[in-house]
Image: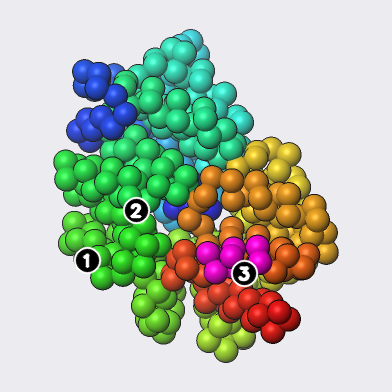
Amino acid sequence: MRRTLTVAGIGLVLAVSGGIGFATTSDPATTAPAGSVGRIVPDSGQDLEASIAALQDTLRRVPGDHGSWANLAVAYVEQARVSGNATYYDKADEAAARSFEVEPDDNFAALASRAAIAAARHDFSEALRSADDALAINPRDLGALAIRVDALTELGRYDDQLEALRTADRLQPSTAVAARYAYAYELRGDLDRALDILRRAAAVGSRADKAYTLTLAADILRKQDRLAEAGRQLDIVQEAVPGYLPGLVSSARLETARGDLEGSVVLWRDVVARQPLPEYLTELGELLEHLGRPGEADAQFAVVRTTIELLDASGVRTDLETALFEADHGSAERALSQARAEWRQRRSVHVADALAWALHRNGRDREALTIARAATRLGSPEAKFWIHRGTIEAALGMGDEARTHLRRGLDTDPGQSPWQRDEARRTLSEIEVGR
């Protein structure tokens, strides 16, 4: 999943810069009212720490400032994401609760912060409820508008996602909304339109906004195999915000696409040292596995398991990440249990892909194919979706369909895990031999 908005997991990047209307011709919205929850993208972890310190100082002087308590809750959510320290979610809970204690009535800022916490913990149904409650009080709150879009996306309610985007763009045109519009089109396979939105957003935003949007643009260019252009975008990102972590992630994948796998390992080690998310650790582990370094790969996979346990203990749902990891590197039975648990909660294309793959790993390919078709229904340029579907079709003896979809997966993103691509090529070779 694009955890890259990915969320994921989800970076609730609520950049509140100049208005950018992409879906409407309405008059520009007014700025968000005081107390609204929204994160201005920090240039660095130090900036985030400074913001937290400033909020804490304000609250020592004015403990009855419910808006600052709510903003502190969102800052703690972001600190958890940036640092990988899940204990910050508990701090976020406490800050949001204090905001409600100070102002129990019509406290849209606290409701929006609660939506941010729920989304960060992957409880997207609760995130949607809290965002809706906040918007019932203040329909223009950028944080709640953005989280509402994210929740609908993660729940697989894609028609509602577009409607929510139109509303958000009408009320609060911004980099935050532009990025979500771009992702909506990317999910649907319209990469050129997504790229155009991101480039226009980058032209008018702050340095941090530019780093954010151009990193997303570089990811799209990589998926289109436009590697030189992707590299140029990432050079601009590092000039705008040196050491920008999402840009470093994108650069690691770009090095993989270029074939510089040792260079990619170096970048991935830097990434996981700063942000040890399960999906990043898995990607590094698979790269090491491909390079014939199984001991180092196993060490990364061990950290994945520990990280998942820590996140689970802090109330962060990791069923999706666990299902994908277990399907390829652990217990197929556990993978299926986790994928089914997540499918009961939400029906996004990413969850469909994980469930289909877990079913395949358990030898239930007929059932898996139906779900794999659901995973690819939007035409999303996610290489693993097509590789998984093609592999399932190969297991069912559907040679022509399997060839088509395996090739589509291999052609979709050269930055995809080399280990995953090896598996796809082996399956494709077996099909060709059997013709």
If the image is split into quadrants, where does the C terminus sit?
Answer: bottom right
Amino acid type, label 3: Arg
Q: Is residue 208 left or right of residue 350?
A: left
With respect to residue 145, does 53 lie above or below?
below
Residue 295 at least partly seen: yes
* Residue 263 picture location, percent across and down: 37, 81
Q: CA distance from mark 3 to mark 2?
A: 30 Å
- The disc at residue 232 is 1
Residue at position x 49%, y 31% from top?
161
Residue 64 at least partly seen: no
Q: Is residue 366 left or right of residue 413?
A: right
- Label 3 sits on residue: 403
Q: Residues within 10 Å of mark 2 (few under 14, many from 20)?
A: many
Q: CA distance from mark 2 to mark 1?
A: 13 Å
With respect to residue 351, does 418 lie above or below?
below
- The disc at residue 216 is 2
Dividing the picture into quarters, in which one does residue 126 lie?
top right
* Residue 360 picture location, percent across and down: 76, 62
Q: Is residue 147 left or right of residue 315?
A: left
Q: Nearer the viewer, mark 1 or mark 3?
A: 3
